Image (cartoon, grey):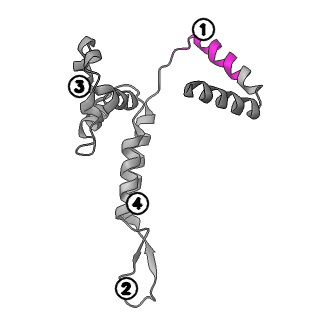
């Protein structure tokens, strides 16, 4: 969801005024933008996740951002406050507790089962393409990639 919202609200897309004039779902996008807003640590998104009754696939970027911020703000080790010890550093458990709290939130969303229904036609398509792709050599795939890039440049 976040990837779609970010793409639709990107500078390139959002300035297509003529296109948006014909879009009947612009108000829906405005509502969705509140969820992807990083203000106040994604407060609206967090509220929606907490209210989710069934399973959900969370936006992991929010938690990765928090982990990166914790890494930047808190050192891995802290100096010993005991004067009797030699100049030794201690593991910063406060940092580890913050990591744990974030991981606990993420893992808590996995406690609810996903109710996916097999769609035989779709499964057959995916499995067939996977089987076909497994027989292709890396060299063939690289050549095909270069061919597509060449076509896009023309």
For numbered disc 2, what is the local secondary structure?
loop
For numbered disc 1, what is the local secondary structure?
helix
Figure quadrant of residue 6: top left
For numbered disc 4, what is the local secondary structure?
helix
Q: Which span of residues is magenta-colored?
A: 117-131
Across and down, in percent, residue 31 comes to: 23, 25
* Residue 55 or residue 21, whichever sits in front: 21
Is 98 located above or below residue 50 in the figure?
Answer: below
Residue identifier under label 2: 82
Figure quadrant of residue 131: top right
Residue identifier under label 4: 71
Q: Residue 10: in sight, yes or no?
A: no
The span from disc 1 to disc 3 (Cα, nearest Å) is 34 Å
Residue identifier under label 1: 121
Across and down, in percent, residue 133 comes to: 71, 24
Q: Residue 147 carries which label?
A: none
Q: Name the residue rendered at 39%, 36% in the picture.
A: 59
Across and down, in percent, residue 42 comes to: 27, 41
Side of 61 relative to 126 (left or right): left
Marks 1 and 3, the one that precedes in the sequence: 3
The span from disc 2 to disc 3 (Cα, nearest Å) is 54 Å
Side of 118 relative to 15 (left or right): right
Q: Name the residue rendered at 40%, 53% in the picture.
A: 67
């Amino acid at each position: 969801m976040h990837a779609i919202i970010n793409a639709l609200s990107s500078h390139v897309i959002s300035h297509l005024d003529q296109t948006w004039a014909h879009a009947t779902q612009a108000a829906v996008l405005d509502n969705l933008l509140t969820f992807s807003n990083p203000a106040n640590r994604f407060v609206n998104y967090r509220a929606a996740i907490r209210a989710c009754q069934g399973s959900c696939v969370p936006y992991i970027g929010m938690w990765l951002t928090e982990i990166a911020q914790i890494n930047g703000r808190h050192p891995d080790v802290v100096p010993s406050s005991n004067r009797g010890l030699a100049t030794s550093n201690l593991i910063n458990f406060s940092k580890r507790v913050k990591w744990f709290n974030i991981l606990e939130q993420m893992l808590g969303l996995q406690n609810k089962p996903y109710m996916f229904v097999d769609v035989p036609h779709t499964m057959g398509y995916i499995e067939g393409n996977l089987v076909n792709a497994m027989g292709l050599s890396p060299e063939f795939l690289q050549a095909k990639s270069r061919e597509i890039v060449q076509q896009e440049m023309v």
